[in-house]
Amino acid sequence: MSHPHPELKAAPPLPEGGLRVIALGGLGEIGRNMTVFEHAGKLLIVDCGVLFPEETQPGVDVILPDFTSIRDRLDDIVAVVLTHGHEDHIGGVPYLLRERSDIPIVASKLTLAFLEAKLKEHGIRPRTVRVREGDRRSFGPFDCEFVAVNHSIPDGLAVAIRTGAGMVLHTGDFKMDQFPLDDRITDLRAFARLGEEGVDLFLTDSTNAEVPGFTTSERELNPAIEQVLRTAPRRVIVSSFASHVHRIQQVLDAAHQHGRKVAFVGRSMVRNMGIARDLGYLKVPPGLVVNTKELEKLPDHKITLVCTGSQGEPMAALSRMANRDHQIRIGKGDTVLLASSLIPGNESAIYRVINGLTRWGAHVVHKGNAKVHVSGHASAGELVYCYNIVKPRNVMPVHGEWRHLQANGDLAIRTGVDPDRVVIAEDGVVVDLVDGRASITGKVTAGYVYVDGMEVGGVTEASLKDRRTLGEEGVVTVVAIVDADTGALAEAPDFLARGFAHDDTTFEPVIPVIEKTLATAADEGIGNPIQLEQLIARAVANWAFRTYRRRPLIIPVIIDA
């Protein structure tokens, strides 16, 4: 298997007739999926998503792919193809369109509807091209054929990209549920047909490559969901992703069967389910869905609420219910159904919400104690089937952390793919397909781009470090009035501390330290206020660490007397 090496340099120019593939996100992480294909001087982008921040990235809303390497080539982009409507595949599109607004966006009906609702909030009207499985469209030198795949959101597509350098098959996110709720299965006949023609490079979803066997069918959740809605004594509150139309369809069907009414709670849930219903992806029996006003008139055992917040997000409906910060008051006899996964890194937030809900007397049904969630991604058994059907010449696992990519590469090798033709890359690594062989040839910059409120890219690793320090260690402002002639303190300095445990006497011992620092500076002829501030900051920081084993952020302010 070829791995990227840290000493990779900038890639040489692409050989004529070759195809270059660069993932700007989604390799080595779960999220921020974005792959750039280059051929004959033009670029085709597949997906443009966001990554959600971790606890070590305070104040960050989302993380974008880094557009630096394509910024001076925006005019060469012939299209952006979106495989499906999840945030980690479409969330970055508004930011790309801010840089060039008329890039054609190619996607299926539901994906475009979700994207257009999002772009409306950004005030952008996109140029869209609607496609469905079986369609074949050309964008510059890229001839794209779209193939149905099954995932945890309807209308997912894989894309086969034919170029002069060979054919690439990109699965997008997919699984092989043989009994999907919408009867739209992953089209393995098309995969086989493309395999017969010859797939030169196969980009496959790695998320579940470490999970043996096959991903359970969505239909197998019906009994558990139905049991909750049949046996719950009072209200049922269901929390799910606001895009998981099939899961919510199962809840609606079970509620209808047991004589309950349903209300959607939370802005994204109301918006997305409205879109899915209007487009016919969500079938709602007449009179089933009510607004929150009508809900108040119903007895508790007739009520089902469908809300967001299954990942423990602090501002989502479910967390606020757990914290008693929502008009819906959870109480004894209520049942809460968490119909979704535990995304790695969110576990403690989710358990905090489960504990909060339990404390108010709710019965919480979740993946850990009932069969109420199945993954949206192919497990190892399904991936192996795909390799055997497609018989690709080169394989590049995508969408996953290192361990997932490696596991997926191992599966490809076990089905007979030459180990030298399995490319394990990470974000920014350049993979060139030349004369039928894929190999790593260099790298481009592909750092994290942080979005904080309206600010894109203004937050850096250094400012995140300051935020972590503020959060963990506090801040101390030192205001020193210095005699301009002597360089000594004109009066005792003032200390303003936040998040640093202190009382009136805490900072008295540091005053001599500051006096000594200023005296040394005066001896050496240092009178520049900026230099003096740096010296004082260092001296106070050293004192705080020696005395209290704390590293607060020190803000020195020098005023000339």
Image (spheres, grey):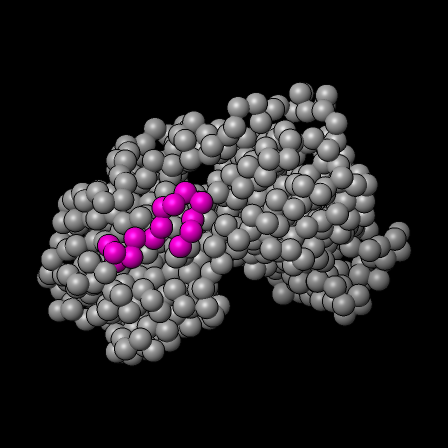
In the rendering, at what x and y percent does residue 558 appear? 68, 49
Residue at screen point 74% across, 31% down: 300
In the image, is residue 233 part of the stretch drawn in magenta? no
Whether residue 77 is visible to the viewer of this picture, yes or no, is no
Asked if residue 187 lies in the magenta stretch, the reply is yes
Magenta span main SS:
loop
The segment highlighted magenta reads 178-191
Frontmost residue, 499 versus 392:
392
Residue 410 location (% of width, % of height): 37, 76
Side of 45 where 311 appears, left or right? right
Query: In the image, residue 211 lies at what x, y percent?
Result: 48, 68
Give the left or right position of residue 184, taking residue 320 as reference.
Answer: left
Residue at x 56% of width, y 60% of height = 344
Residue at left offset 72%, top offset 21%? 297
**Residue 28 placement (x, y as % from top left):** 44, 64
Quadrant location of the N terminus?
A: bottom left
For the C terminus, the image quarter is top right
| Residue name at image x 10 percent, y 61 percent | 16
* Quadrant hosting residue 305: top right
Figure disc tally: 0
Between 181 and 69, the one lying in front of the other is 181
Choose between 147 and 10: the one closer to the eye: 147
Q: Quadrant of residue 122?
A: top left
| Furthest-front residue in this view | 257
Near-viewer residue (27 or 112):
112
* 329 relative position to 142: left or right: right
Residue 461 can be seen in this image: yes
- Quadrant location of residue 520? bottom right
